Image (cartoon, rainbow, N blue to C red):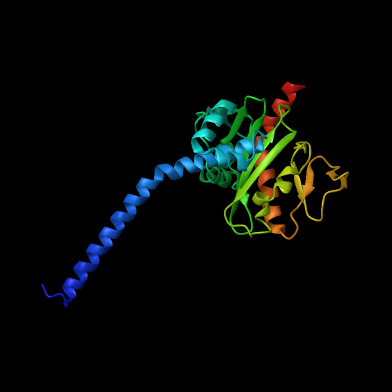
Amino acid sequence: MNTNGNLYTIIYTSVIVILVAALLAFVSQSLKAKQEANEKADIMSQMMTADGIGTKASFQEMGNAAVLEKYAAEISEAFTVNAKGEKVSDISLDKVWSPSDLKAQNNRIKKGELDAVEAPVFKFRNGTTVVPIYGAGLWGPVWGYIALKADGKTMIGSYFDHESETAGLGAKIKDDPAFQAEFTDEMADFSQGRIFEIVKGGAPKEGGKSVLDNKIDAITGATMTSKGLDEAINNWLGVYKAYLTSVQTEEE
């Protein structure tokens, strides 16, 4: 075959493209299980961090296998609820909800299709409940977890993550432990129009702590990220309202 001809060039190029595509597909499949394991362990560590079982740094040092083992020892029950507070279905204790899973439910929330929403609830052996949130930041999605005491309204802690918020500003929802610590001992006030508020300009403080139980300071210079997180928290806690207020009634 004429190696300088067009036919040779086309055949040669096609073979190279096919080989590269096959190699990429093989690598992708080979790494898929590891990527899924990394994501699963990361989500479990985020929930346990919110619940005060450990810190994100400590879980990262443990490795995936140890994180999964710790989560299995701490989780007691998982299920989905609808906006009426009714249990819809059980969740296998070894399953987590990825950001893409949360996004699908968030789309229903945004459309007002609350009857179709199935929101996950994770209950731990220490009597706490962890619920996820999901929404839009400045440049992409934000999500995270809020841990609540057995009364269904007092926050133990939180952990938030993002896809592409600005480093040093919006990214502080993940990178700044002080911001996440602000949620500790705050309240989800289901009697108010705004269940929780991240306040631009600062929430009133006394002794370094907010004097209003359901308000914390927004991140300085990250107005849109703070607003997006605020909306995400209120939208999702709004879905959980019926369930969590029923838990409050039981506690009383």
Residue 138 visible in the displayed image: yes
Q: Is residue 190 above or below residue 224?
A: above
Query: Residue 127: x and y, percent?
Result: 67, 25
Taking the image as shown, residue 182 lies to the left or right of residue 113, namely right
As rendered, which of 65 and 5 lies closer to the eye?
65
Quarter of the image for the C terminus: give it: top right
Q: Is residue 75 visible?
A: no
Near-viewer residue (213 or 86): 213
Q: Who is closer to the viewer here, 154 or 45?
A: 45
Q: Residue furthest bottom?
A: 4
- Front residue of 128/193: it is 128
- 24 with respect to 89 (left or right): left
Give the residue at x 17% y 71%.
8
Tally of numbered tags: 0
Residue with the most extreme left position: 1
Relative to 225, 97 lies left or right: left
Q: Is residue 150 above or below residue 241?
A: above
> Residue at position x 58%, y 34% from top?
120
Residue at 65% across, 41% down: 236
On the image, which quarter does residue 85 sit in? Answer: top right
Whole-percent x and y of residue 74? 59, 27
Quadrant of the rendered structure where residue 12 is?
Answer: bottom left
Q: Quadrant of the N terminus?
A: bottom left
Furthest residue in direction right, as rendered: 206
